[in-house]
Structure formats: structure tokens, C-alpha cells
Image (spheres, rainbow, N blue to C red):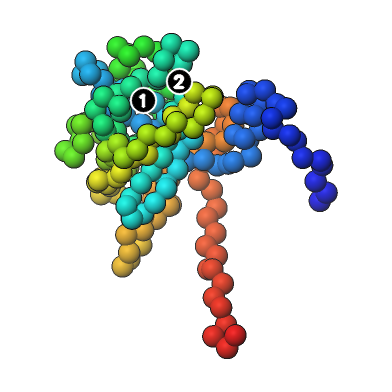
Amino acid sequence: MALAAPIVTDQLSGRERYELLTSLVVPRPIGWISTRGTDGVSNLAPYSFFAALSASPMLVGVSIGHRRSGPKDSLANIRARGAFCVNVVDVGHLEAMNASSIDSGPDHDEFEYAGLSAADSDLVDAPFVASVPAVLHCLLHREVDIGADANTLIVGRVVGVSLAESLRRVEGTRYVQTESLQPVGRLWGPAYALPGEIRAIPRPRPDPAD
């Protein structure tokens, strides 16, 4: 397969760069971020610029965009409370996750709009979706300004993990079996990747004789 000449990204519009990046870096885990505002209103929103960053310390990162009027509610709440929860999106929560992406004001409770029950974290000052299979309870570790496109990278330190009793583990480890988690991945636009065939391929080992 021959590759065409490189596309010079500085010659693209912001929308074109977004379309290209989000259709090639796939599937992406969804950071379904729940926070609490200074007025006590719960907020819930999905972000697909989300990733695991480190295991020791356990860190996750989510890139949150800004509105023209200022920071999005998730970012404002994380700054105010110093905490958030990441709710793992499984197949059963796909529609509710999509509903929670509605663009609304800070006084709008996305939990209620999406028909979800909220529970309070025992570890951080944030709510979480009570029915999801897994939750990461996070404290704000670091905030990073990543440039002129008005995005802020939030690095969270995971201080606790809640797992549903129904999740199966790999014996002798802390691994959660993907088949029982049934995670959803983000593709581009309205497209999502659902669980399909899972292949396990052992990593190659060096020959001791070499």
C-alpha cells in the first residue's frame, strides 16, 4: 500500500484537524466525567480526549475544551472542587452517555436529563453514575494549558476504584475481563466501537541464547 504525500496540518482549519485526528486515533476510551458545581448541582459529560497516563502514581488525563464564554462546566467544577469521577461507559450506558453530552448551562443536571441515578463518592468531592460497572475516583493532580485552541489538560490522580460485583477478574491478578466489562470506544462524529472479537497475542520473548 502506497502512502500519499503528507498532509501538512498547519495548512488545515481547526475543524479539518479535528476530523482527521478523531477518525485516525481510534477507538478512544471515553472519559465520562462527573463533577459537582459550587452550587451543588451535579454535572456529567463525556470526553473522548481521555487516556490512562501512569500506573504508579495512578494517573488519568482528560482534555477539556472551552466555550467562547469561558471554561466548560466540567473544568470549572474540577477547579472549584479539586475532584472528579470517571465513569466507565459500557454498552448498556451508551444511550445515556450520549444524552449527557447535551450542551447546557451549569444549572442543568445531566444525571436527571439522562435518567441516571447519582451516588456520592466516599473518597472525593464528586458524584458518580451509580449503575456503571466501574468508577475511578480522582483528585486534581495537575492542570496543563496545551495551547491556543483553548483546551486544558486535566491530570487526575486515581485514589480509588469502584467495581461492580458482576465483573469477572483474571484469576490471580487485578485484571478485569474485557468480555464482562463490555466497554464502548469513541470513533468519529456519532460513531462508536462496540465490543467484538478479542484476540490475545503474547508478546515475543528474547531468546536466552542471544
**Mark 2 to mark 1 CA distance (whole Å):** 8 Å
Q: Is residue 108 above or below residue 75?
A: above
The secondary element bearing badge 2 is classed as strand
Would residue 101 be found to the left or right of residue 196 on screen?
left
User: How dense is the environment of label 1, judged by Cα within 10 Å: few (below 14), some, or many (20 and up)?
Assistant: many
Q: Nearer the viewer, residue 126 or 166?
A: 126
Residue at point 37%, 34% (across, down):
143
Look at mark 1 in the image and give the residue it sits on: 75
Residue 166 percent location from the top left of the image:
29, 49
Disc sitting over residue 190 in the figure? none
Corner quadrant of residue 199? bottom right
Residue 19 percent location from the top left of the image:
64, 29
Q: Is residue 144 above or below residue 107?
A: below
User: How dense is the environment of label 2, judged by Cα within 10 Å: few (below 14), some, or many (20 and up)?
Assistant: some
Three-letter amino acid code of the residue under disc 2: His
Would residue 186 be found to the left or right of residue 161 on screen?
right
Three-letter amino acid code of the residue under disc 1: Leu
- Residue 184 in view (yes/no): no
Count the marks. Answer: 2
Corner quadrant of residue 45? top left
Residue at point 32%, 52% (across, down):
57
Q: Is residue 24 above or below residue 10?
A: below
Looking at marks 2 and 1 on the same chain, the residue that comes earlier in the sequence is marked by 2
Disc sitting over residue 66 in the figure? 2
Would residue 207 be found to the left or right of residue 114 on screen?
right
Mark 2 and mark 1 residues within 8 Å of each other at the beta carbon: yes
Corner quadrant of residue 104? top left
Residue at point 35%, 24% (across, down):
74
Residue at point 48%, 27% (across, down):
151
